[in-house]
Image (cartoon, helix red, strand yellow):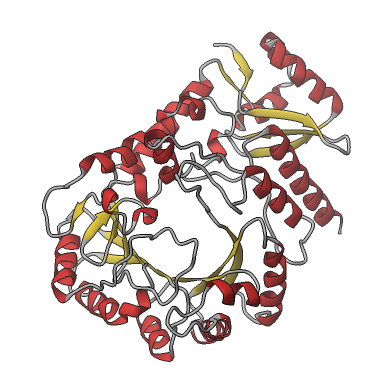
Amino acid sequence: MGLLISKYTYIFVSSKNKYLLYNSFANCFMELNQDLFNYLVQCKENPNLIENINDDVLKIFTENRIIVTENGDEKFIQELKFKTNQITYSQNNLGLTIAPTNECNFRCPYCFETNKKSVSMTDETIDNLISFISSHTNAKTMGITWYGGEPLLAFDCIKKILAKLKSLPIKLKYHGIVTNGYYLTDEVIDFFNENNLNQIQITFDGNKNRHNKYRRDKDTKQGSYDVILANADKILEHMPETFLSVRVNIDKINSIDFIETVKYLKERWKNYKKFEVYPGILRIDKEDKTNLGGNAMKYDDIVSFLFALSNKSDVIERNYFPTFAPKVCAATNINSYIIGAEGEIYKCWNDLTDPNKIIGYIDENELTNPYVYYDYVISCKWHENAECVKCFFLPICHGGCAWYRLRNLRQNGKYHLCQIFSDEESLKKCLEIYYEKYENKKNQ
């Protein structure tokens, strides 16, 4: 069987005249001498020349899938599809995002939960939730992420649920919370230290002035920045086993706030290691919800912003080398659910409180709206999209957000689903950044 250069092999000359090769199939990156580079260019045009490549070099190229058999790339697609479906239909782990309340102490103007009601889980709903979990008899492990609303407004519900879970045979493998951070009191911290919380995510809306404009207490109208920052300090000091993830929301207007915030927090927390600060690109939809609008950062804006960070290594260490990306999320996994405060079930976090996206209820044996469920699990898969299947970037792309993909499929959406590596110019720039950093580190 003949050999050829894989379609996942990209060879290019850098801006500093380095002859480089990247393969997204194996995620390998190497520097070539000029003669070998030129020969590979010829091999792409005439695969018969491959047989003249030195045996040792050929072995390296085939091991790294730079050179493959005639059907090697097609086999990869089949293998990846199989592995994706393995994860999709596995019932070994139960993934739950639980919103014990829809209530929130803030009213952030960009919040996607537009149909909020002031509802918290009743004892009956909690009992139904435990029964729902127990019904997943094939699941040996589970992960829970507390969500909302603001989940800590229903702290008593969280305590009741975790207490009841301890009587079940299922093992809690992951335990996290997404919170605005305002109610992280000493009592909450002590409780989560006793209940092995893996991760806490809190959010700042840029610098102090912007944050206090967007995240004010809905009743008192007071800003929340100082309270949340002080609580974050307490987390790092008193929860040494818990990772603190700090999201800094940005849009076109305040993207510079991210650098400012990172510098400040890194200096403030220089004695701690278990935290990260990352940019949260705000999704601001047009009124008809078919595309991004307003001050939302579009694809080109995001690419420019992220590359600007590459010159700020003293502020943030960002790895610009591509990595393999999972192609299954909660929305596309049959054993992952989002549970609302009234016991309603959704497939995506972004659907919470949207009555049209409720797929069922935890106290019912059958789904009430199975077609939304089917759409997420089946229609949103990368292998259902011809452009994804043939794309060079498939191995290192997450396949696009299922929530946006469903909008494109069913609501005439025109959302850009691809990530930063999804064009040749951006990939080349990412690889050059990585190469330069590698060379600099090597020569130090």
Up the image or down, 66 lies above or below 256; here it is: above
Lateral position of residue 133 relative to residue 290, left or right: left
Give the residue at x 39% y 85%. Answer: 188
Residue 207 percent location from the top left of the image? 65, 73
Residue 56 percent location from the top left of the image? 71, 27
Q: How many marks?
A: 0
Kindly indicate the quadrant of the structure image that contains residue 111: bottom left
Give the residue at x 42% y 85%. Answer: 189
Give the residue at x 64% y 76%. Answer: 209
Residue 247 percent location from the top left of the image? 56, 66
Give the residue at x 61% y 23%. Answer: 6
Q: Which sits in the foreground, 99 or 33?
A: 99
Kindly indicate the quadrant of the structure image that contains residue 97: bottom left
Residue 230 percent location from the top left of the image? 56, 86
Q: Is residue 379 visible?
A: yes
Up the image or down, 55 lies above or below 14; here it is: above
Lateral position of residue 102 relative to residue 225, left or right: left
Looking at the figure, which quarter contains the C terminus?
Answer: bottom right
- Kindly give the residue lying farthest to the front in the view shown: 287
Q: Which sits in the foreground, 68 or 77?
A: 77
Up the image or down, 1 lies above or below 387; here it is: above
Lateral position of residue 254 relative to residue 99, left or right: right
Up the image or down, 55 lies above or below 116; here it is: above
Lateral position of residue 205 relative to residue 337, left or right: right
Q: Is residue 274 visible?
A: no
Looking at the figure, which quarter contains the N terminus?
Answer: top right
Kindly indicate the quadrant of the structure image that contains residue 311: bottom right
